[in-house]
Image (tube, rainbow, N blue to C red):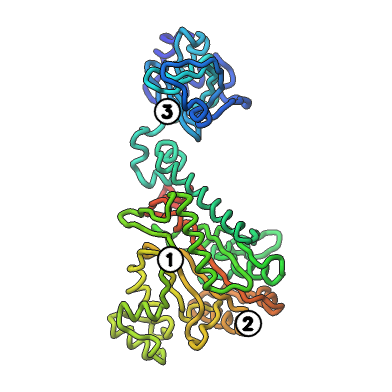
Amino acid sequence: MNEKTETATLSSDATEVRAQKLKLLREQVGDVYPAHFHRTITNGELAAKYEGLDPDTETKDVVTVAGRVYSSRNSGMFMDIHDASAKIQIFSHKDTTPEEARALLPMIDIGDIIGVTGVVRRTKRGELTINAQQITMLTKSLLPMPEKWHGLSDIELRYRKRHLDIMTNEESKLRFQQRSKIVSGIRRFMENDGFMEVETPMLQSVYGGATAEPFKTHHNTLKLDMYLRIAPELFLKRTLVSGLTDKVFEINRNFRNEGVSTRHNPEFTMMECYWAYADYEDMMDLVERMFAELAMSVHGSTEFTFVDKQISFKGPFRRVPMPDAVKEATGIDFLSIKTDEEARAATKAAGFEIEKDATWGECLAFIFEEKVESTLIQPAHVTHFPKDISPFAKEVPGEPRLVERFETYCNAWELGNAFSELNDPQEQRKRMVEQLEQAHARGEKEKQLDEEFLDAIDQGMPPAGGLGIGVDRLIMLLTNSPSIRDVILFPARRSKAD
C-alpha cells in the first residue's frame, strides 16, 4: 500500500474518512469483518498471568488477543486495545512487526476492533505490551468514538446510546457489572436458603397482584386481550397451593403503565418470593440477611456511602409500627381514633387535604407518606399497615384494622413489601371483590376478578410469608446511583422526535 498516495485522497469528514478506509481495506485485505478469529487469552488473563514480569523483559511467549482500539500514538506504533476485561498495549515496529502488518496501521482508527498475535513483554516503564507479529482487522468502526476521557456529557444521550456510555465511561461499565453481580447474588442467596426459582406468565388475561395501570395488548390467534403483568403474586401463590415447593421465588420483570421518575421506570425488576409456614417476621429476617450479604459482596462491608449518606445494612434493622411512627412524627394517635370521619378531621387539622371519602386506614397511610417516609434514611421495617390498603395480608391479632405487613425503607425509598399472606379463601374473595369495586369506581372498567386464582385458594393454600424486593432501587443504593435510569441498561425514554 502506498500510504501517502492513499491517505492524501481521503475526505476531511471523519465519518467519510472511515467509509473510504473501509473501501480501501476491502480492496486490499478482503474480508474486513471475518467470521472466524480465535484469541488465545483475554487481556485480563494476560495481566494476571504476567503480573510478576519485570520491566524491560521480553518473553518468548506468543499470544493472540483482540479488542477495540482506544488510543493510538506515533502513527499507530503504540496502540491500546480494550476487551471486556482490561486493556493491553500493542507495539508495532519495523524491528519486530512484518511490513504486511505495519501497512495496516494507517487504516486503523480509534474504535476499530482488531486481533493481534505477538510476543509478550514489559516495557522499561512497566507497561505490559505485545510486540505485534500479525494484525487482523476484525471490525471497522464507521462512526468516531466520543472523547474517551470525558465520556458522554449529554445525560439523555448516555441513556439513548448506552453502548457509547459504557464504552467511554468506566463508572458506567462497573455499575452494570455490579448489577449483574447483585442479581446473581440475590438468586444465589435465595437458592442457598432453600427457595426454588420458577417462571410465571408475563402475558396475563387477568392482571392483578398489585394496584397499577397495566399495558394492554392483543393476541391475534386466541382473539384475546392480554396484559403485561404488573406482579407475579397470584401465580406464585398458586405454586404454593400445588405443593411443588414450600419456598418459591422469581426474579421477574414487571410492567406498569404509569409515571417515569428517578425511581420509576415502566418496566422494572422485582424479586418476589413466598414461604409456606412462615410469616412477615420471618421475611424481615430474610431481608436483613440478604441485604447484608449483598453489601458484603459489593463493598466488602455492610457499611457503604450513598451520595452524602453513610448507610448500614448491618442487622437488625429498626422495626416500627406505622401508627407509632405517625404518632411520633405528628402526635396523632390513630389507634385512639375510632371512625373514618374522625380520621379525616384529624388529617385536616394537621394541615392536609384528604379525599372526602378517605377511610381511617387511608388517612393513616397518607400522613405516614407525608410526614414519616422522608425521615427513614437508615434501613427500617415499617410494620402494621392499615387493612384498607392491604387486601392480601392477615389481620394483626387484637387490632382488625391493621395487618401483618411491612415495607422496608432506606434513603426514604421503599425497597421491599411483605405480608403474612391471607389464605382464608372466603375473606380473600371478599377483599378482592371490594378492591374490584373500588377500581371500577375509579374508572378502571377492564379490571376483573381473578377467578382462577380464587379457585386455587379454595383448594387450600398453606399459611405463608410473602415478599417483594425492588431490585433496581436496591442496586441504586448499592452502586451509589441517584437515578433508576443509571442502573437499567436500556431505560424507557421519549422518542427522538419528542
The kind of residue tagged 3 is: Tyr
Q: Which residue is mark 3?
A: 70
Q: Is residue 494 visible?
A: no
Q: Which residue is mark 1?
A: 414
First along the sequence among labels 3 and 2 = 3
Q: Which residue is mark 2?
A: 424
Residue 362 picture location, percent across and down: 42, 81
Secondary structure type for disc 3: strand
Q: Is residue 438 visible?
A: yes
Quarter of the image for residue 106 reads top left
- Within 10 Å of disc 2 (Cα), the crowding (few <14, some 14-19, many 20+) is some
Examine the rendered structure and indicate whether residue 491 appears above or below residue 217.
above
Q: Does residue 455 appear to the left or right of 332 in the view shown?
A: right
> Which residue is found at the position 44% from the left and 49% from the top?
300
The kind of residue tagged 2 is: Asp
> Which residue is found at the position 55% from the left and 58% from the top?
253
Marks 1/2 in contact by CB < 8 Å: the verdict is: no
Q: CA distance from mark 1 to mark 3?
A: 41 Å
**Which label lies toward us, 3 or 2?**
2
Secondary structure type for disc 2: loop
**Which label lies toward us, 1 or 3?**
1
First along the sequence among labels 1 and 2 = 1
